[in-house]
Image (cartoon, grey):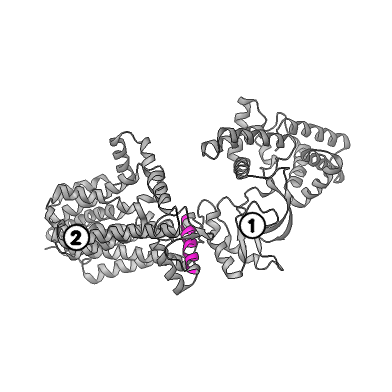
């Protein structure tokens, strides 16, 4: 007789609750809100919290034109903020609760339809241990995707249960969860519907179940509520519906279909994206239980069509596929439960003497197998909290430091950053709490600049500045004017940003060094050309605009105005490929002084004054003063120093010094 000590209601249900709550809240506030999507939703919620407009989401004081989804997750976050305050816990709590509900309802539903505690336990456990679901990008953030996973899973299984039982209450559940999915993910809520239709055509075909009065009534009500929201928001924010069509349909989906010519190529890529273990399909041959078999059919069909709906889009991101994970987890969990039950049954009936094959020993082994994936998820959480979005930006620490800066009447600051959305939540929160105006504004030259560690957009490339305040995490700089003799347009700023991307990357600089051998360009000329190439690849300007920018900044380079924030010449020269001559101790001493001047705000300010009187290009003046520093430190004779100054002046003229 089959004996399964694990299969008690108290153990399985309590175990799932403990595991789920632990993973949902384990170090949930350890990392700052830095992911762009999470920060954007957090700002939407914070602005709704203050302005009381629950229809239109706002970002930086204006209707949000990037995030066009309906705001159900934002409403939940606002409620959480009202209860727990404006902090990371309040922002992430709704999705942590969604994680708990997904695991809990999966357990209850699989147990209900199969009558099998063990299979239900493993289905829920597999959901918990999908690293992508428990990672920082999904259920441990304030983003939209996590709540969407919950509603899509619940409306799909409400539909499945209605087909099985004809119980009208599941029609109510289906439309409730479908409406919530639409108010959470917009168009993404519809991706599972083709899978539901195909399953019906393959395994049911009783069309009369859709003709009941309740089904038709709720269909009309759903259409009215969804369309009604979009037109209500359109009345507040004219152009919103057009944005939805452009961003969620035309921009993200239909236009991208042009690159997917072969249906079967697309379908195969979907299977690869799902990462379905192919041994799952053995279930369809081994399992005789009709309910379990149809649950697997249903789950695989729905998962496939969700992935198929996402795969053709060029705008998809890796975590969009998480909608499929609960359905894949159910298949895996049913397989594990099937294996566990049959192994335990066989051992209970046939093994009496070998202690290693006792059911209790097998149960202990399964418990260890449970602990291992939980450990892996905890490890993923610990690793991902260290660095978010590719780098750690100490936003909270920097703004805390700003409170120590004696501003007097000064309340307005401009931030320069290449990841503005990631900073937006803390910036908006600081503004509300301190009656301040920190903003992303590169046009008002009278603003004081707030430069946070890790976000140097190339500020010294654009402006002359004076240091007002400095801490370990930030600098406050006074802008004293443009470095160039022309105003900077948006196109200029984009071009300069790409210049800095190349100049501040050792890897990209190495590529540039290889290119100049073949193109016979100076390195700075090559960097300018490639900055234009990056603009072209990103569709950030017409060919004519980019050509004008390349010519303009080539002229600035010739004047010696393009050199700031580049990698140290000393570091580059150690590769042995930078200059066409060997470097001795005097060369490295000279280059050390050169870098010291070039990377110091205070010394550069002195250089700026000198070139007014000496009529030298900035770079030539720096080279002369690098020699002067060698001389006053007794690090070379006058002849040696003059030779070094002349040699590196020639290298500068050839474009080999940035």
Occupied quadrant, residue 449: bottom right
Residue at 57% from the left image edge and 68% from the top image edge: 432
Per the image, the residue denoted by label 1 is 414
The earlier-in-sequence mark between 2 and 1 is 2
Residue 335: percent from left, percent from top: 22, 53
Mark in the foreground, 2 or 1 = 2
Q: According to the image, label 2 marks what residue? A: 215
Instruction: Please tell me whether residue 48 belongs to the stretch shown in magenta.
Output: yes
Q: Give the range drawn in magenta.
A: 37-49
State the predominant SS element of the stretch in magenta. helix
In the rendered structure, the answer to whether residue 222 lies left or right of residue 564 reads left
Furthest-right residue in this view: 638
Q: Which residue is drawn at 34% across and 52% down?
A: 188
Find the distance from the CA under tag 2 to the CA under tag 1.
55 Å
Q: Which of 13 and 237 is in front in this view?
A: 237
Who is closer to the viewer here, 315 or 648? 315
Q: 406 left or right of 455?
A: right
Is the C terminus in the top left, top right, bottom left or bottom right quadrant?
top right
Marking on residue 598? none
* Quadrant location, the N terminus: bottom left
Direction from residue 495 to residue 595 in the image, left or right: right
Q: In this view, does 557 lie above or below 149?
A: above
Residue 286 on image: x %, y %: 15, 49
* Residue 503 occupies quadrant: top right
Circle 1: element type: strand
Q: Where is residue 117 in the image (x, y as percent from the top left)?
A: 21, 64
Asked if residue 304 is among those painted magenta in the image, a careful observer would answer: no
């Amino acid at each position: 007789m089959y004996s399964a000590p694990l299969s008690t209601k108290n153990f399985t249900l309590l175990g799932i609750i403990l595991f789920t709550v632990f993973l949902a809240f384990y170090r949930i506030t350890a990392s700052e809100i830095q992911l762009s999507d999470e920060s954007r939703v957090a700002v939407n919620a914070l602005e709704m919290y203050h302005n009381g407009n629950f229809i239109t989401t706002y970002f930086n004081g204006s209707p949000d034109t990037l995030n066009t989804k309906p705001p159900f997750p934002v409403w939940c976050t606002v409620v959480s903020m009202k209860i727990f305050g404006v902090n990371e816990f309040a922002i992430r709590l709704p999705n942590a609760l969604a994680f708990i509900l997904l695991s809990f309802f999966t357990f209850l539903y699989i147990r209900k339809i199969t009558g099998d505690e063990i299979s239900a336990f493993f289905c829920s456990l597999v959901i918990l241990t999908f690293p992508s679901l428990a990672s920082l990008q999904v259920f441990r953030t304030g983003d939209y995707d996590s709540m969407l996973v919950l509603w899509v899973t619940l409306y799909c299984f409400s539909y499945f249960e209605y087909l099985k039982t004809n119980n009208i209450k599941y029609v109510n559940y289906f439309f409730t969860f479908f409406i919530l999915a639409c108010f959470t993910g917009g168009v993404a809520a519809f991706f599972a519907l083709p899978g539901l239709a195909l399953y019906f055509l393959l395994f049911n075909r009783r069309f009369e179940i859709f003709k009941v009065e309740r089904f038709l009534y709720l269909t009309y009500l759903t259409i009215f509520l969804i369309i009604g929201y979009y037109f209500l928001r359109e009345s507040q924010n004219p152009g919103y519906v057009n944005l939805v069509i452009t961003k969620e349909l035309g921009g993200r989906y239909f236009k991208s279909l042009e690159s997917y010519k072969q249906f079967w190529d697309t379908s195969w890529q979907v299977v690869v994206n799902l990462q379905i273990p192919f041994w799952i399909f053995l279930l369809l041959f081994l399992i005789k239980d009709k309910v379990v078999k149809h649950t697997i059919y249903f789950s695989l069909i729905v998962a496939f069509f969700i992935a198929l709906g996402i795969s053709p889009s060029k705008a998809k991101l890796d975590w969009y596929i998480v909608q499929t994970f609960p359905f894949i987890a159910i298949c895996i969990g049913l397989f594990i439960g099937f294996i566990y039950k049959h192994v335990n049954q066989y051992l209970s009936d046939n093994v009496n003497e070998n202690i290693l094959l006792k059911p209790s020993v097998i149960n202990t082994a399964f418990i260890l197998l449970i602990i291992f994936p939980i450990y892996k998820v905890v490890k993923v959480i610990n690793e991902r909290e260290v660095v978010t979005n590719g780098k750690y930006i100490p936003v909270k620490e920097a703004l805390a430091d700003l409170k120590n800066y004696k501003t007097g009447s000064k309340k307005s600051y401009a931030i320069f950053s290449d990841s503005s959305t990631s900073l937006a939540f803390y910036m908006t929160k600081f503004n509300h709490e301190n009656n301040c105006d920190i903003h992303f504004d590169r046009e008002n030259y009278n603003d004081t600049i707030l430069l946070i560690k890790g976000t140097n957009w190339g500020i010294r490339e654009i402006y002359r500045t004076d240091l007002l305040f400095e801490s370990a995490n930030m600098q406050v700089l006074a802008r004293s004017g443009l470095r160039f003799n022309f105003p900077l347009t948006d196109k200029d700023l984009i071009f300069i940003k790409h210049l800095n991307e190349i100049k501040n990357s050792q890897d990209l600089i190495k590529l540039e060094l290889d290119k100049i051998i073949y193109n016979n360009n100076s390195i700075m000329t090559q960097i300018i050309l490639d900055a234009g190439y990056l603009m072209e690849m990103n569709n950030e300007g017409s060919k004519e605009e980019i050509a004008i920018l390349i010519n303009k900044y080539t002229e600035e380079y010739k004047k010696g105005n393009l050199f700031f924030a580049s990698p140290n010449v000393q570091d580059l020269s150690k590769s042995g490929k930078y200059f066409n001559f060997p470097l001795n101790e005097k060369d490295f001493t000279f280059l050390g002084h050169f870098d010291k001047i070039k990377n110091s705000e205070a010394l550069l300010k002195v250089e700026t004054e000198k070139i007014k009187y000496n009529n030298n290009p900035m770079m030539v003046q720096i080279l002369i003063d690098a020699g002067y520093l060698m001389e006053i430190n007794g690090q070379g004779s006058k002849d040696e120093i003059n030779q070094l100054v002349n040699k590196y002046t020639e290298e500068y003229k050839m474009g080999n010094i940035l």
